[in-house]
Image (spheres, grey):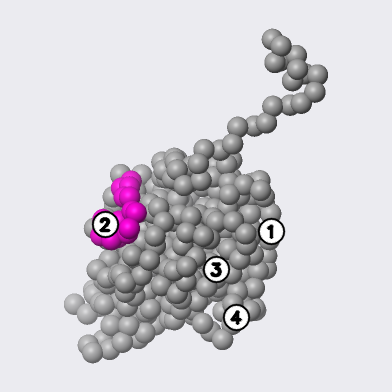
Amino acid sequence: MKKRTALISAGLAAGLTAGVVGGAVARRRHEHAVSPIGDLPPEDLGPIPSFDGTELAVRAAGDPTAPVVLLAHGFSLDMSVWCAVWPELARDARVVALDFRSHGASGRAENGDLTLRAMARDLAAVLDAVSPDRPGIVIGHSMGAMAILALAEQRPELFGPRIAGVALIGAASSDLLRGAMGSVTELLRPRLGSLHTAASRVDRLRKAVLASPVDISGVVARVTQFGPDTPKPVVDHVVSLARRTASEVWTDTLPELMEMDLRHAVPRVRVPALVVVGEDDRVTPPAAGVALAAALPDGRLIVLERAGHIPMLEEPDRLVRELRAFVSSVNGPAAEPKRPRGKKATEEGAA
């Protein structure tokens, strides 16, 4: 019985890892050698130093004078998950994407600070660098969305003057232990033991299962993380990201996410807020999205049918439509192109 439980735990850990992981450490910076499934934003703005000197990888696309939209990825992912989203958003906005500390191409966290509040300050550092004199919209997935809530806890004065709106995808403000990741962590926590111990066990199981020649991780990832229609290349991509996960992210950040309670910060998000959750999301179930949207001062909920925890890769077309509509509602419609001056314009006016 114990052996069977361990195997189930290992499979779930691998599947959950495959759904929400990415990036690996190469000296001070992370190599970005995972096979891409889409392009990254073309302009390299990094490295941008965070509050403690940690160097953040930041890329951008779109008109530099347009309103800013900042994209923040989830736990152990990187900016590559926005590959199907940023090109459409960049039609009307200046889209900026970052890799959080110890993720993707960013540097390892200075002084080992991998707390959610440190990642919130990563967001603030990037906003200060790319949009110092105008408000922007911040879109966060999973941990990235929770970092937005942590920023509201620390810097509520930013919401309104500097942050005009937020979109929270696959998010919760507390009770992550009720989701799939929490179930695995609790399963592996010894009686009266800590979540840090459980996280270390999850990391060891993750490495063992991903090293196996049998493709357990891809199968379990599809079952635990994705909706029923997710293309195989998407699953393969996030599994390949899983193979390069830095252990420090799992052992240091995961326990805090499991114990996180930011419900007191939600009322401080006094700007328009869109909450998006997949109908088949098992990490942050739809009930978490319903509760979050209801608690926000100006929240609205969208449930994407047949999507799991990573709708940016599962149902990008539907998600992009919702995000573009939200950005437009916050910023106003895109400005009409100016008519040309000179003889041609005069002739057109006469006609």
Q: Nearer the viewer, residue 107 or 128?
A: 128
> Which disc, if any, is residue 52?
4
User: Which secondary structure, mark 4?
Assistant: loop
State how far apart marks 2 and 1 are (Cα): 38 Å
Place residue 290 in its image quadrant: bottom left
**Mark 4 touches mark 1? (CB < 8 Å):** no
Quadrant into which the N terminus falls: bottom left
Label 4 and label 2: CA atoms lie apart by 35 Å
Q: Earlier in the sequence, mark 3 or mark 2?
A: 3
Q: Quadrant of residue 180?
A: bottom left
- What is the span of residues highlighted in magenta in the rendered image? 289-304
What amino acid type should be assigned to the residue bearing mark 4?
Asp
Mark 3 and mark 2: span between their CA atoms?
26 Å
Mark 4 or mark 2: whose residue is earlier in sequence = 4
Number of the label disc, if any, that sits on residue 294: 2
Percent of width and height locating residue 138:
49, 57
The residue mark sitting in front, 2 or 1, is: 2
* The magenta stretch spans residue 64: no
Label 2 vs 1, first from the N-terminus: 1
